[in-house]
C-alpha cells in the first residue's frame, strides 16, 4: 500500500502551553476544523474528558464522511500524537501528530499525518498529499486566528445551483504557488491598478479572479485578476481579456477574511463531489462583492462559482 506523508507549520502569537492546551482539547476542535466548516451540522461525539490520553473525537456527516480521532500520547507542551480512523468514504488508519516549539515569544506548531492509501488508489498519492496539505494549512490559519483573537472570520453559505449571465473581464494574468497566492494576487492587483491609471480608465464593475489551471503535483495555479467590463469596452495594452458565456454554476458564498477563502472553495468542491454534480471545462472563479477599503474584514463577501455541465 502506498505510504504518504503530510506536514504543515504555522507560527502563533501565544506560548506553547496555551497552544497545547487548546489543540489537545477535542471540544475546541469544532472552532477551527478545516472540514466542519463545509458541514457544520455534521454529528460530533466527543469524550467527556476531551483532553486526555484515550479521549476520542468522532464525526459523521453526509459530506465529511465519518471517522474517529483518538489521543494516544500527550506530552505538554511539546507533543500530541493521535490515531485517525476513517470509516467513510473508505476505511483507513493514519497517524497524526502536532509538535510545538518556542518561536520568539510565540509558538511554531507543525501538523503531521502519516498513512497508507488503499492499493487501488495508488495513483492519487500526490494529489492526496496536496489536498490534505491544503486542508492542514486552512486549519492552522483558523487555529492561529482563534487563539490570537478568540474568533475566526470565516463563514460559508451554500446557495447551490443557479444560472449566471455572461462575463467579460480585463486583468492581469499570473502563475503562483498555492502557498504564495495571497501575496502574488496582491501584486497582480497593484499592477492592474497601475495599468488602469496609466490608461486613464476608471475602475468599473466588480473585481473577479478566475483560476485557469491547477497543478496539484507542482502545487501551483494560473489565475487572472481583473474587473468585470461591458462587451463594448476596449482592453488597454498590458492587460488580458477573459470571458465566459452564460452558464449553470454551483455557487458558494464566503463571508469573512480573504485569507480564509480556501474554506469556500473546499466547501464548493466537497458538496459538488458528494452530490455527484459534474463540472464543465470552463474555469472556476470568485467575485468580490465588497472591498476591504470600506468593509470590515468579518463582513467581506466573496461568491465562488464552479461552472457546471
Image (cartoon, helix red, strand yellow):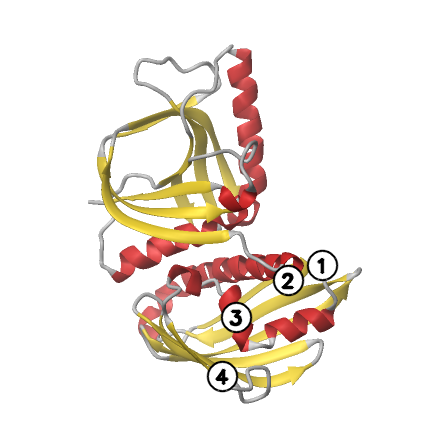
Number of marks in the image? 4
Q: Which residue ends up furthest to the top in the rendered image?
A: 200
- Residue 13 is tagged as 1
Mark 1 or mark 4, which has the lower sequence index? 1
In this picture, is 201 found above or below 19? Answer: above
Marks 2 and 1 close (CB-CB < 8 Å): yes
Which one is in front, 213 or 26? 26
Query: Picture coordinates of residue 101 (x, y %)?
Result: 73, 69
Could you tell me if residue 85 is visible in this image?
Answer: no
Q: Earlier in the sequence, mark 3 or mark 1?
A: 1
Is label 1 in contact with label 4 (beta carbons under 8 Å)? Answer: no
Residue that label 4 marks: 56
Residue shown at 55%/49% (left/top)? 179
Is 55 above or below relative to 162? below
Residue closest to the eye, 144 or 190: 144
Q: Secondary structure at mark 4?
A: strand
Q: Report the residue marked by disc 2.
A: 147
Q: CA distance from mark 1 to mark 4?
A: 28 Å
Q: Could you give the CA–CA distance between mark 4 and mark 2, rounded to whole angstroms?
A: 22 Å
Label 3 and label 1: CA atoms lie apart by 19 Å
Crowd rating for badge 2 (residues with CA inside 10 Å; few <14, some 14–19, many 20+): some
Q: Earlier in the sequence, mark 3 or mark 4?
A: 3
In percent of width and height, residue 141 lies at: 57, 57
- Crowdedness of circle 4 by 10 Å Cα count: few (<14), some, many (20+)? many
Residue contact between numbered discs 4 and 2, judged by CB atoms under 8 Å: no
| Residue identified by numbered label 3 | 29
Instruction: Locate residue 97 relative to residue 85 in the image: left or right.
Output: right
Q: Secondary structure at mark 2?
A: helix
Amino acid at each position: 500500500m502506498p505510504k504518504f506523508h503530510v506536514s504543515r507549520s504555522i507560527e502563533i502569537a501565544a506560548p506553547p502551553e496555551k497552544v497545547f492546551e487548546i489543540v489537545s482539547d477535542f471540544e475546541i476542535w469544532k472552532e477551527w476544523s478545516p472540514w466542519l466548516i463545509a458541514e457544520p451540522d455534521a454529528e460530533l461525539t466527543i469524550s467527556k474528558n476531551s483532553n486526555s490520553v484515550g479521549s476520542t473525537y468522532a464525526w459523521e456527516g453526509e459530506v465529511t464522511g465519518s471517522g474517529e480521532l483518538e489521543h494516544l500520547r500527550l506530552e505538554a507542551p511539546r507533543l500530541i500524537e493521535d490515531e485517525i480512523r476513517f470509516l467513510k468514504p473508505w476505511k483507513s488508519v493514519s497517524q497524526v501528530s502536532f509538535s510545538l516549539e518556542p518561536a520568539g515569544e510565540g509558538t511554531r506548531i507543525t501538523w503531521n499525518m502519516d498513512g497508507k492509501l488503499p492499493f487501488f488508489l495508488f495513483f492519487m498519492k500526490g494529489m492526496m498529499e496536496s489536498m490534505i496539505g491544503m486542508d492542514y494549512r486552512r486549519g492552522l490559519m483558523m487555529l492561529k486566528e482563534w487563539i490570537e483573537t478568540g474568533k475566526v472570520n470565516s463563514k460559508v453559505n451554500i446557495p447551490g445551483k443557479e444560472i449566471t449571465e455572461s462575463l467579460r473581464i480585463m486583468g492581469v494574468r499570473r502563475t503562483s504557488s498555492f502557498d504564495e497566492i495571497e501575496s502574488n494576487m496582491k501584486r497582480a492587483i497593484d499592477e492592474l491598478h497601475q495599468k488602469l491609471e496609466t490608461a486613464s480608465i476608471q475602475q468599473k464593475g466588480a473585481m473577479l479572479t478566475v483560476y485557469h489551471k491547477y497543478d496539484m503535483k507542482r502545487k501551483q495555479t494560473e489565475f487572472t485578476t481583473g474587473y468585470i467590463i461591458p462587451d463594448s469596452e476596449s482592453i488597454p495594452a498590458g492587460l488580458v481579456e477573459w470571458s465566459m458565456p452564460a452558464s449553470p454554476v454551483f455557487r458558494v458564498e464566503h463571508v469573512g477574511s480573504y485569507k480564509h477563502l480556501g474554506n469556500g472553495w473546499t466547501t464548493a468542491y466537497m458538496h459538488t463531489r458528494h452530490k455527484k454534480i459534474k463540472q464543465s471545462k470552463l474555469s472556476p472563479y470568485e467575485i468580490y462583492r465588497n472591498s476591504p477599503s470600506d468593509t470590515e474584514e468579518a463582513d467581506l463577501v466573496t461568491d465562488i462559482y464552479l461552472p457546471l455541465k
